[in-house]
Amino acid sequence: DVAMLQIKPDQFTYTSDHFPTILRMGEKLLQEGKAYIDDTPPDVMKQEREQRAESCNRSNSKHHHMLFISAAVEKNMQMWEEMKKGTEFGQTCCMRAKIDMNSNNGCLRDPTLFRCKNAPHPRTGSTYKVYPTYDFACPIVDSVEGVTHALRTTEYHDRDEQFYWVIDALGLRKPYIWEYARLNLNNTVLSKRKLTWFVDQGYVDG
């Protein structure tokens, strides 16, 4: 227990406080052709990633001719607006990073950066209809909050390259990832998925 060790945090912060910044960062990637909006069904997307096959929507951002780039950005931004409005079509889309579909690291095969979810958020209410993934939000928040060392267990090792890709693509200050082995404890529950049950049952307030 952190309190028992007399460790006192300097401050508590929430990723949702940075939603405006994270949205701007996502739009920056779209405008620079480093990301694209994809309405590929989830099951097809999963199969394409396993087979290292590019989505048909990836071509929204792959042309180098200025006319094609302008048209691609416009198309992506139109689809992005649908996502931000939470429209029926927008809810079928996600924003994906344009990295490397042939990478041996599956985490680099155009991972999802934003999903559309037309549901209220515990802190921001119904302000937003798009939400960043953990893998996109973490490097941004760590950088802008001045984190120097990000402590992550080795289970996230494959995602470290993605963490640094986001940092480099956005030109942000780079935190150092410090890896350590996961600590498993007996006679207690640490899994967030399992802890959710206690919240849902009203035993704790989350």
Image (cartoon, rainbow, N blue to C red):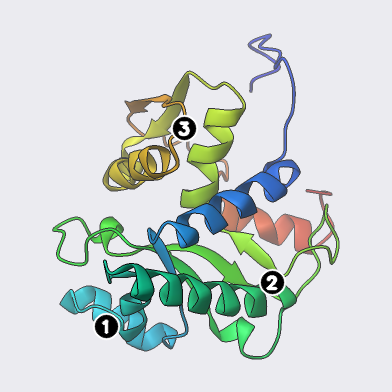
Give the residue displayed 34% in from the left and 67% down from the top. Answer: 66
Q: Residue furthest top?
A: 6
Q: Which residue is mark 3?
A: 172
Give the residue displayed 59% in from the left and 30% down from the top. Answer: 144
Apparent side of residue 22 relative to residue 150 in the rendered image (left or right): right
Where on the picture, by quarter, is residue 45? Answer: bottom left
Q: CA distance from mark 3 to mark 2?
A: 24 Å
The amino acid type, in three-letter code, at marker 3 is Leu
Q: CA distance from mark 1 to mark 2?
A: 26 Å
Give coordinates of residue 13: x percent, y percent: 72, 32
Q: Which residue is mark 2?
A: 84
**Nearest to the observer: residue 103 or residue 173:** 173
Q: Is residue 202 above or below residue 21?
A: below
- Element type where label 3 sits in the image: loop
**Which mark, residue 47?**
1
Mark 1 against mark 2, which lies toward the viewer? 2
The amino acid type, in three-letter code, at marker 2 is Lys
- Element type where label 2 sits in the image: helix
**Nearest to the observer: residue 34 or residue 157:** 34
Give coordinates of residue 78: x percent, y percent: 59, 78
The answer, for residue 133, to whether it is visible in the render is: no
User: Label 1 neighbourhood size at 10 Å, few (<14), some (14-19), many (20+)?
Assistant: few
Mark 1 against mark 3, which lies toward the viewer? 3
